[in-house]
Amino acid sequence: MKKELVIEWKHIGKDIEHTCERCEETGMALNAVLAEISMLLEMEGVSVRIIETVLENDAVAESNSLLFNGVPIEDLLEGIEVTTTPCGSCSCITCDAETECRALRYNGEEYEAIPPDLIGRAAAKALEME
């Protein structure tokens, strides 16, 4: 039976080129990781499907998030804490100077964009759960 990895990327803005800077970085990191591992996944019989969900501006609290087979990255990888930090580019999109965007705290580091390493580890963990 063929496995499927469904990754949902949620962000505000109309697409990867018109979203906030950190969401764009997360989207580019996701694409880079998948380009790196897609052949290996294919050899293992895993198909990958990306769902890009463009959120309304009032849903900025959900922006810059990745779900792997429906599970948020922070629930897949132990030790990740979701936080928010001021985001100038989200402020421009939402027309609200006080806008904060999701960020992750992991091993004492704060990440405004989700780094490739965490994306790859979350993908592997999601596949282990099937």
Image (spheres, rainbow, N blue to C red):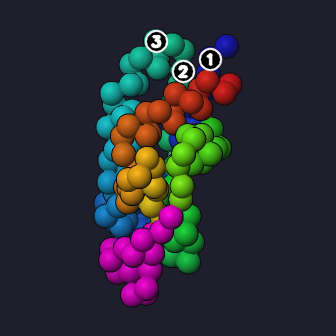
What's the residue type where badge 3 is placed?
Met
Q: Residues within 10 Å of mark 2 (few under 14, many from 20)?
A: some
Instruction: From this view, report whether residue 39 is shown above or below residue 88.
Output: above
Q: Residue at x 43, y 33 (%)?
A: 120
Q: Give the left or right position of residue 66, taking residue 129 as reference.
A: left
First to last magenta residue range: 83-101
| Left or right: where 44 falls relative to 14 | right
User: In this view of the protein, which residue sits in the foreground, 42 or 74?
Assistant: 74
Upstream in the sequence, badge 3 or badge 1? 1
Image mark for residue 46: 2
Label 1: which residue? 2
Q: Are marks 2 and 1 in contact (CB under 8 Å)?
A: yes
Which of the image's four quarters has the C terminus?
A: top right
User: Which corner quadrant holds the N terminus?
Assistant: top right
- Judging by the rendered image, the residue that carries numbered circle 3 is 43
- The answer to the question of whether label 2 and label 3 lie on touching residues, with beta carbons closer than 8 A, is no
Image coordinates of residue 55 in percent, x first then y, are: 53, 66
